[in-house]
Structure formats: structure tokens, C-alpha cells
Amino acid sequence: MLSAAISSRPTLTNKLDPMSQQQANWKYVDDLVVEPESISLARQHSLELGIEPVSPAIGAQLALLAAASKATSIIEIGTGAGVSGLWLLQGAPRATLTTIDSEPDHHIAARAAFAEAGYGMGKVRLIAGRALEVLPRMNEESYDLVLLDADPDNVIEYVEHGLRLVRRGGLVLVSGALANGEVANPAKRTPIATGFRTLLTEVADSPAVYSSVSPAGNGLLQLVRH
């Protein structure tokens, strides 16, 4: 009788397809994150300025990695309105943050966001300028954690600079590594998709780093320098 009852149960015909399931997972992990008010406000300002900030799930990962690495010196390429920087300092409150961005409006918004969260100028150093012009002047092996969250067209050059700037055993993190799903689709051959695809293939085979990619949000490439 039990087997007959089981066989008579209706089958589920409305299962989510793999892509819908993935999107449901992304939404679920984003919704789990409780953002501090200062970060939530910075996110709102980001969207008003037309900046796409890191997702809450990626932000939480940034905080976790900053905490796990016990980072005391962090550099960020791509300040935006301060969302990612605030998440990093949330995980490493004793760290100092150097953040680079070429847009004056971004600096104004980020400076206000850091001040609102209680981080003064001694805690956060904002540098105005193009990253590819600023980074060569930064000292080698001076940072525990490097976050790259800027122009994806130059991501390979940014990673090369990041690995030069980070100490041995330190972290280089690359936000947006899946390029809105384009990287996983071989039919997508845009410069950004091709660049990230090349980067991910090279670091996966590199003896110089340990690498891993988180699929949350828009993807987060995580590198540890040997």
C-alpha cells in the first residue's frame, strides 16, 4: 500500500530551470545579508549616480575575507560611492584604506559615506586619478588586501599591479569577474568577456597564486599570492 501511495503522488512539473534556480540562489544569498545603515545609504547614492555597486552578498564576502586575512593595509581600485570600501572596513575595522577613482562625483559621495560611518581622513585615503597612472607609483608588497572594482577593460593590467602591490600570502580580489554571465557563455566574445575569460584561465594554471571564483552577485575572483 505504501508503494502504491508513493507512486500515486503528483510529480512536480514546475521545477525551476537551471538559470532560474541560479537567479533564485543569487537573490536568496543577497536577501540574507543585513547591511549596516551606512552601507545601505551608500548603495542608494551609488544607484542615484549610475554606479553599479557590489551586491550585498559580495560585500559580505569582502568583509569576511578582510576579517579572515586580518588586513591592516588595504588598497581599492574603483572607489564608487564607497560601498565596497565600507564593507572592507566592516570586516577589518583596524585597517587603513587607500582608494583610487578618477571621477570627482564619486569622491564626493564616498567621502560623505565614510564620514557618515565614522571613518575619518586618517582612516581612509582617497586618491583622485586614473588607476593605471597612479598604481605604478605605489610601493610593492605594501598591502594585505587589494580590491579591483574598476574599469573591466583593463582588468588584466590591474591584476598585474595588484599582485605586485600585495604582500606574499595577501589577497587580490576582482569584482565583476563573471561579467553579467558573459564569461560563462562562449558565444559572447566582447572585449570584457574575452579579457575575463583569459584572466580566469591564466590564474587557474598559474603557480604564482591560489585562485577561486565565487559565483555570487556578478562574480568575485579571489587570489592569494604565493
Image (spheres, rainbow, N blue to C red):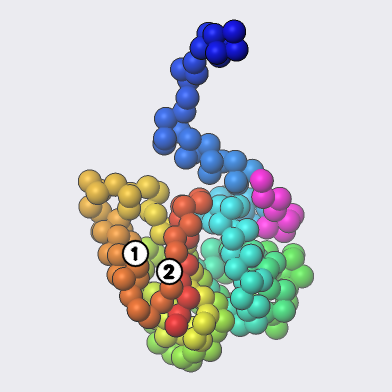
Task: Residue at 47% x, 28% y: name it.
Answer: 16
Q: Quadrant of residue 115?
A: bottom right
Q: Amino acid at mark 2?
A: Ser
The residue to which callout 2 is attached is 211
Q: CA distance from mark 1 to mark 2?
A: 9 Å
Start and end of the magenta stretch?
A: 32-39
Residue 203: within the magenta?
A: no
Q: Is residue 154 visible?
A: no
Mark 1 and mark 2 lie on one chain; the one further toward the N terminus is: 1
Q: Which residue is mark 1?
A: 200
User: Left of 200 or right of it: where is 96?
Assistant: right
Point out residue 88 in the picture as x, y percentages from the top left corner: 63, 68
Give the structural element (helix, strand or loop) at label 2: strand
Nearer the observer: mark 1 or 2; the answer is: 2
Q: Is residue 209 above or below residue 16?
A: below
Observer-nearest of 128 and 85:
85
Task: Return the mark for residue 68.
Answer: none
